[in-house]
Image (tube, helix red, strand yellow):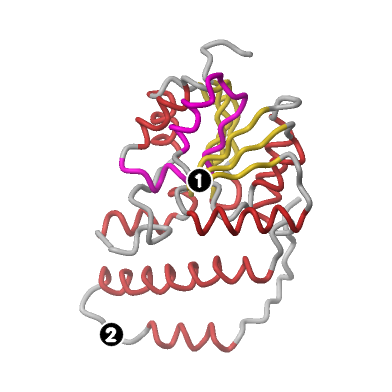
């Protein structure tokens, strides 16, 4: 049914103040829009960062949506590799639904944090290593069931090459990246050439829904299920041309 809002609404004073400021003359309508886009980006980013202090990892809406999708699609007793696991935010979820989980990350500091968090939770079916994900996969000697690439592709110089390497060594791939199309204002930023068009300082790619699908299919992966909620693209893919 959606969220029902009272017809009579209370408008906070700060909103009225913002509208007054917006009446200040500027050189052009485009320069006015550019300023507003930059302000929106700043406050969106601050809200995003603050949300991870306001909600625990297990209670954060982004984690809940991801967990719900993984619970629905994961094969039973899966052997899982989480490439770019960072401090292990996703490893606890993966441990609930998998027989064996390995997390890898280039950062020794992040791996140390992940091991600390896992030890605190007492998870005994998760191991974490500081190494390259593709090299680890190639060294395993046998395909794993699932490779997780959560917020990784947008950081890579050549995401298609990584996807091709991964697709050869697993049955399924889970991909999660920010959804460029989640905000209409991102298209305004693109058309106006605004510099604040990225969702994180470390990103060198931002993908819309068509682009990420083409990237995955170009690497030989077939998208089986998608979820576009809460500003993220979540894609469950098979490395086989036929259902497995």
Q: Residue at 46% across / 84% down in the picture?
A: 18
Give me the residue at 50% from left, 45% from top. Answer: 84
* In magenta segment, residue 206: no
Front disc: 2 or 1: 1
> Residue 218 placed where, x, y %?
38, 23
**Number of marks:** 2
Residue 131 versus residue 5 in the image, above or below = above
Please tell me how crowded label 1 is: few (under 14), some (14-19), or many (20+) other residues with Cα within 10 Å.
Answer: many
For the residues labelled 2 and 1, the Cα–Cα distance comes to 47 Å
Magenta span: 133-157
Front residue (pair 78, 128)? 128
List the residue tagged with mark 2: 25
Q: Nearer the viewer, residue 103 or 199?
A: 103
Location of mark 1 (residue): 84
> Could you tell whether 190 is left or right of 11 in the image?
left
First of labels 2, 1 by sequence position: 2
Indicate whether residue 140 is drawn in magenta: yes
Mark number for residue 55?
none
Closest to the observer, 99 or 5? 99
| Residue at the top extreme of this rendering | 242
Considering the numbered disc 2 on the image, is that residue within a helix, a strand or a loop?
Answer: loop
Residue under the image location 46 percent in, 27 percent down: 166
Picture quadrant where residue 51 is located: bottom right
């Amino acid at each position: 049914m959606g969220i029902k809002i009272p017809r009579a609404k209370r408008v906070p004073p700060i909103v009225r103040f913002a509208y007054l400021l917006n009446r200040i003359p500027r050189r052009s309508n485009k320069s006015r829009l550019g300023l507003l886009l930059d302000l929106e980006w700043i406050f969106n980013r601050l809200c995003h960062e603050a949300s991870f202090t306001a909600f625990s990892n297990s209670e954060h809406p982004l984690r809940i949506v991801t967990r719900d999708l993984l619970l629905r699609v994961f094969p039973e007793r899966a052997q899982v590799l989480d490439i770019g696991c960072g401090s292990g935010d996703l490893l606890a979820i993966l441990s609930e639904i998998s027989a064996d989980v390995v997390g890898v990350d280039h950062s020794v500091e992040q791996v140390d944090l992940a091991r600390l968090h896992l030890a605190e939770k007492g998870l005994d079916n998760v191991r974490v290593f500081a190494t390259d994900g593709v090299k680890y996969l190639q060294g395993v000697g046998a395909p794993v069931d699932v490779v997780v690439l959560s917020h990784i592709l947008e950081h890579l110089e050549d995401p298609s090459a990584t996807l091709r390497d991964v697709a050869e060594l697993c049955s399924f791939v889970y991909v999660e990246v920010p959804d460029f199309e989640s905000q209409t204002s991102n298209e305004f930023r693109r058309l106006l050439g605004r510099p604040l068009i990225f969702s994180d300082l470390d990103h060198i790619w931002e993908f819309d829904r068509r682009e990420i699908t083409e990237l995955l299919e170009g690497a030989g992966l077939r998208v089986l299920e998608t979820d576009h909620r809460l500003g993220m693209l979540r894609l469950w893919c098979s490395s086989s041309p036929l259902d497995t």
